[in-house]
Image: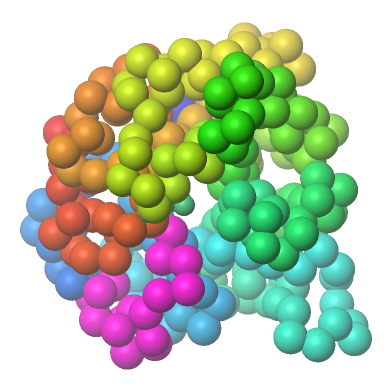
Amino acid sequence: MRKKIVAGNWKMNKTLQEGVALATELKNILAVEKPNCEVIIGTPFIHLATLSELLKDSVIAVSAENCANKESGAYTGEVSAAMVKSTGAEYVILGHSERREYYNETPEILKEKVDLALANGLKVIFCIGESLAEREANKQEAVCKAELEGSVFHLSAEQWKNIVIAYEPIWAIGTGKTATAEQAEEIHAYIRKCVADVYGAQAADDTSILYGGSCKASNAPELFGKPDIDGGLIGGASLKAPDFKGIIDAWK
Ligand code: PGA
């Protein structure tokens, strides 16, 4: 059976000290009230080693928000998948629309990143999703399929077991405008069908597909109540422990 997941994406927020404080608060809360799902926090590179150590005996897994598309060498300022893995992090978020848009990450670059992440033993949370213009032109299915084909559908069935998909409509990210549970379910079911076409029905059934985009404690129960929505990738609401815990509780 596929995993239920609530994953935070801190983006470019929190100094090291603030991140340690938030992770400690979450760890303490979840030690008392065990979550009914896997909990992951995606953080900037600077937090990874400290938080992996801090959270090693907790229920919380740590994820990077990016890694380089090169193995190693003269790439000033970049952080490789091997380096991320060496911090103790288990996951890496790749393909986020902010990386695609502001840092020109193409499907080809993302494919290289996915391959290196998997080769170095990381699990990948791979983000896909359409813009407002694409949604208005009813192109969301074509966009999601093309993003999958461009960067992850070349993987072997064995590699696919380490992929989590996050559907994040760009028009819902940080805007307060959430996709309705019906809109989200419709495309999640379509994404699962695309996975089934490539990897078979069983693999598709075992794939966790998360929703992201203004997900919060008030709308998470309805979203997570849909058969093809296996949890959330949470930006803004992952920056305060009570808000994030409220979303984790949607699985109760
Ligand atoms: P948001 O971000 O929850 O702040 O909309 C989600 C994301 O970008 O992963």
Residue 162, above or below 59: above
Question: Where does the C terminus fall, quadrant-wise?
Answer: top left
Left or right for 166, reference 32:
right
Q: Determine the residue located farthest toward the right in the rendered image.
A: 74
Q: Is residue 150 visible?
A: yes
User: Which residues are the magenta region?
Assistant: 7-24
Q: Is residue 251 visible?
A: no
Q: Of residues 43 and 139, which is closer to you in this image? A: 139
Left or right for 39, reference 121:
left
Q: Of residues 42 and 178, which is closer to you in this image? A: 178
Residue 110, above or below 47: above
**How was this image coloured?**
rainbow
> Residue drawn at (85%, 70%), measured in percent from left and top?
71
Left or right for 161, reference 148:
left
Question: Where does the N terminus fall, quadrant-wise?
Answer: top left
Q: Position of residue 79 (x, y in %)?
A: 71, 77
Q: Position of residue 140 (x, y in %)?
A: 61, 23
User: Can you tell which quarter of the image residue 241 is in?
Assistant: bottom left
> Residue drawn at (11%, 52%), measured in percent from left and top?
33
Residue 179, above or below 63: above
> Residue drawn at (59%, 43%), measured in percent from left and top?
127
Q: Position of residue 249 (x, y in %)?
A: 16, 42
